[in-house]
Image: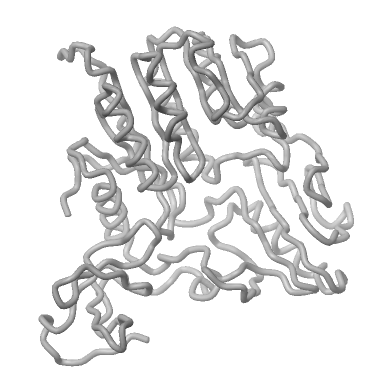
Amino acid sequence: MLESDDRPLAERGRVDGLSPDGTGSAVVHGRRVAVPAGWPGDEVEEVGGAFRVVVPSPARLAPLCEWSDRCGGCDLDGLDGAVRADALQGMVARAFRDEVPTRWVPSPQPRETRARITLSRQGSRLGFHGRRSHELAEVTSCIAARPEVDAALRALRPLASSWGDGESQIEVRSDGHRVVLRVDGDPVPVPAASVAWAGVVDRVGRRGDVAQGDATMAWGPTAFTQVHLELNAQLVADVVAWLDGCEAALDLYAGIGNFSVPLARRGIRVTAVERPGPSAEALRANAAGLPLSVLALDAERFDPSRVPFDALVIDPPRKGAGDVLRRALRNRPRRVVAIACHPASGARDAAIAVAEGYRAVARTLYDFFPGTHHVETVTWFERTERRVTASRPTPPRGQGGRGGGPRRR
């Protein structure tokens, strides 16, 4: 509840940033506290051990989505875009605690970007679960989703009344051209004529049709793909540019070959490691005819000394790479690209790289999830013994990114 009163700010506090979990961060009564519903600029006070907003921030604007306060998918919907960008850059800067020049690469549009959504079905009810909630928020559309994904959601709505009892998780994903539906749980009948699906799976573990996107990258409905297709293309281009001149690359947590395939197409020999499963199967298909060796095993079990490489790309899950990164760096690759979907784990991995004799040259933040507190962070490293000269290649800047050095908070 947003309220207002005339008590002096000394008795309250102002939210001056965001935490990696999306909560507001403020100093109240001389101590740093978390404010669950706080956004930058909000004035807050403590009541009964909890914190409430008493003066809303001028950066609070009208939300773009009518369901954002209930569904939890876009937790910062309604926060001024420039304020949100500054808050996310500050959040990353506080997590990494270094002086690395940082750039922000914004989404080309504030909504209609997500190539993948997961719906929850309870009987004939269809929607999203609220943040940290088991309550189902029914929706009829999703403005965060790409148009073809939202069209699929709209097509599912009139079918839901005939599904009867049961519960399911329904994932809808797009490669930019075609849509794939995957259902985990009780099956839902979808007449073939009702939606132009590329493939349908009614249980986890069963493979659907393989979509071919731009006819060069195969992926299945259970393989991991990035959620923002346009910014992912920018990220891939930046990775390829940063590793230009390298001869052999190791790609850990390689997925379907998001980085491996473009690097191999540039003539770099690539060893890609991905755990057994749908992503590794798609990776093998994508590697055909390229200088790309696929090892289907967990990165944690891979011995980097088995292969030579002078470039490393590592895109771990949310928990970070940890010892996997440490072992890989002992091969002393010239250049390293470390990707993180969570600032805290990314900071831990960066500290490992520095301890192993690497210097962070630059950091880039890609706004993969507009309207949320999530951000994709990439740190570009090189070996410290490499002599730095004026001719050193310029780190990737990202198209449309803001200029400037690291943000101070």
Q: Nearer the viewer, residue 35 or 174?
A: 35
Which residue: 41% across, 47% down? 342
Residue 49 in the image, given as x and y percentages of width and height:
31, 83
The relative height of residue 147 versus residue 313 in the rendered view (above or below) is below
Q: Locate residue 279, reporting x and y percent.
A: 67, 33
Q: Residue at x 31, y 25 (%)?
A: 381
In the displayed structure image, the side of residue 341 where residue 287 appears, left or right: right
Coloring applied to the structure: one colour
Could you tell me residue 336's position as x and y percent?
Answer: 37, 23
Q: Is residue 212 left or right of residue 401?
A: right
Q: Position of residue 240 (x, y in %)?
A: 43, 21
Residue at 73% from the left image edge and 58% from the top image edge: 170
- Vertical placement of 275 versus 48: above or below? above
> Is residue 180 rendered to the left or right of residue 398?
right
Say which quarter of the image contains residue 395.
Answer: top left
Q: Residue at x 38, y 20 (%)?
A: 329
| Relative horizontal placement of residue 259, taking residue 102 as reference (left or right) | right
- For the C terminus, give its image quadrant: bottom left
Residue 133 lies in quadrant: bottom right
Picture quadrant where residue 261 is located: top right
Closest to the observer: 81 or 57? 57
168 or 385: nearer the viewer: 385
Residues 93 and 219: in front is: 93
All told, the count of numbered labels is 0
Q: Looking at the rendering, in which quadrant would you find the N terminus?
A: bottom left
